[in-house]
Amino acid sequence: MTNEELKLKITTLLPEAVFEEGGEWLNVNVNATAWPALATQLLHEPELYFNYLFCLTCIDWKTHLTMVYHLDSTQYRHNLVIKIKLDTNKPEIETVSNLWRTAEFHEREVYEMFGVNFLNHPDLRLLILPEGWEGKNPLRKDFDDPVNMIRL
Amino acid sequence: MFEEIGTTAEGDLQINVGPQHPATHGVLHLVLTLNGETIKKVEPHLGYIHRSIEKMCESLTYRQFSYVTSRMDYLSSHINNNACALIVEKGLQVDVPERAKVIRVIIDELTRIASHELWWGAMAMDLGAFTPFFHAFRERETINEIMEETCGARLTMNYIVPGGLMMDIHPNFQKKVKSFIQLFRSKFDEYNELVTGNIIFQNRMKGVGVLSPEDAISYGCTGPAARGSGVKCDIRKLYPYEIYDKVQFDEVLETGCDSFARYMVRLKEMLESIKIIEQLIDNIPEGEFQAKTKAVLKLPKGEFYQRVETARGELGVYIVSEGGTTPYRIKYRSPGFSNLSALDHMARGSKLGDLIAMMGTLDLVIPDIDR
């Protein structure tokens, strides 16, 4: 599907979705509460069939966090970017590791680096950071570690 | 190497593999849950070589940040640099001279061959055959010499920069690449005679580490790990960059879904890379090797994403720019990280000894996984 067709299709699935255009791919802003239902539809709707989650990450905007999901379909080769705003102080979102298995590791990385709590994740614990780092989130903008000097 | 750390409530044995195990080729730490010799669970513990490259890049300029990417997947350093160069060029809308594009592709493919050579030698060594390692390194050394002459480095090249190349190729480059092609073609049959046809090797590889195409996609596996399951995922074909749409080559696909299929994909990919180099080596256009760019690069406000095919699979570089001289946020979607996540699924129910063959055919490079 082209970006225009994708836009129409997603509007029928979720009328309150907000679109951003101009980039390479269609960007869709959705609410954290609407995300689990939309994610299931993106994967299972035969016309969409976004079966390949090729990137899952988070951005710290200081005022809020944004989860970013990059999706691809191995059948139609159309791409989509989903963005979800989260509260900085209590970031919580439903896991998608039940839909795309790759999300299990990527969400664990986001959990330790940004402190996002993924609800119903099968095994949410530190993956890269050693024990004792719970609560400290290195990729947050306010994180500074003068001893281990990450900033050059 | 294998250290016992206890038993679970069900009476299963838990052991450590690594972080200093020879078969992990780096500091990978796996905690295995075993019932007798059968694997019930594989839990990777990462981070032994985590340098927080993503955070580091937030304070590096667009000219500097590609240098640290050579240290991610150090066997695909040219291709990592290429991804960084491409994303900056995309943001600034720079037209790269044709000469630079052709040289980039030749050098990317040489990197892929060198990486697969090292994998092939190390993989055979993991399974107990020591000789192939020397055969592989004999050919790989020739590539390293070519790189050394042209880029001044053997491992972390930093030769591909935003706008083109760091410097022009060495006058001997074409001659040496052509003699390498001749050498490689004459030695390639040895690889099959030494390893591929060996019945012990085949018995250890066939039916081991089965990964269905659906699971490969769901786990985000890319590169030879997914192509061994018949999944079309070659970024060079699907989303061509540089001049990959103008050269003739086949995407190698196998349908075995097991370790042997992944082995065959990599072996055949080396020949495809040779095919690409042969088409280009006599046709390097004359002209500039670098486009004119400003001394200080500033990407416009916005988001940029670049996908490239490294020797291990799909590398994604995602940049969020606020219009400054450094990225606001940068994310590297590394192929090894996703490929490793499928290991637990692949290994469950198989024997401990087979884990080595599975890790070997996933071609894990730990600095790429940890970043």
Image (cartoon, coloured by chain):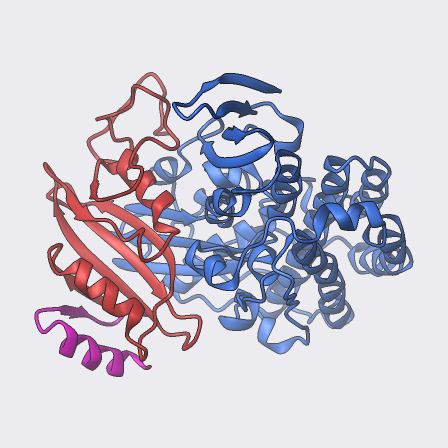
Chain colours: A red, B blue
Image quadrant where residue B189 sits:
bottom right
Q: Say if the magenta span includes residue A16.
A: yes
Question: Where is residue B24 drawn, in percent x and y?
Answer: 61, 33
> From what the image shows, is residue A101 above or below residue A125?
below
In-front residue for pair A35/B13: B13
Q: Would residue B127 be found to the left or right of residue B237 on screen?
A: right
Residue displayed at 19% across by 31% down: A142
Question: Where is residue B53 drawn, in percent x and y?
Answer: 42, 37
> From what the image shows, is residue B174 above or below residue B155?
below
Image quadrant where residue B23 sits:
top right
> From what the image shows, is residue B85 above or below residue B61?
below
In-front residue for pair B64/A142: A142
Q: Is residue B156 visible?
A: no
Q: Is residue A85 visible?
A: yes
Residue displayed at 85% across by 52% down: B191
> From what the image shows, is residue A152 above or below residue A116?
above
Residue displayed at 61% across by 63% down: B100
Q: Would residue B45 be found to the left or right of residue A32 on screen?
A: right
Question: Where is residue B200 drawn, in percent x and y?
Answer: 82, 45
Q: Quadrant of the N terminus of chain B?
A: top right
* Residue at the front extreme, as displayed: B10
Question: Where is residue B222 drawn, in percent x and y?
Answer: 52, 57
Number of marks in the image?
0
Residue displayed at 80% across by 57% down: B177
In-front residue for pair B264/A91: B264
Stretch in magenta:
A2-26
Q: Say if the magenta span includes residue A86.
A: no
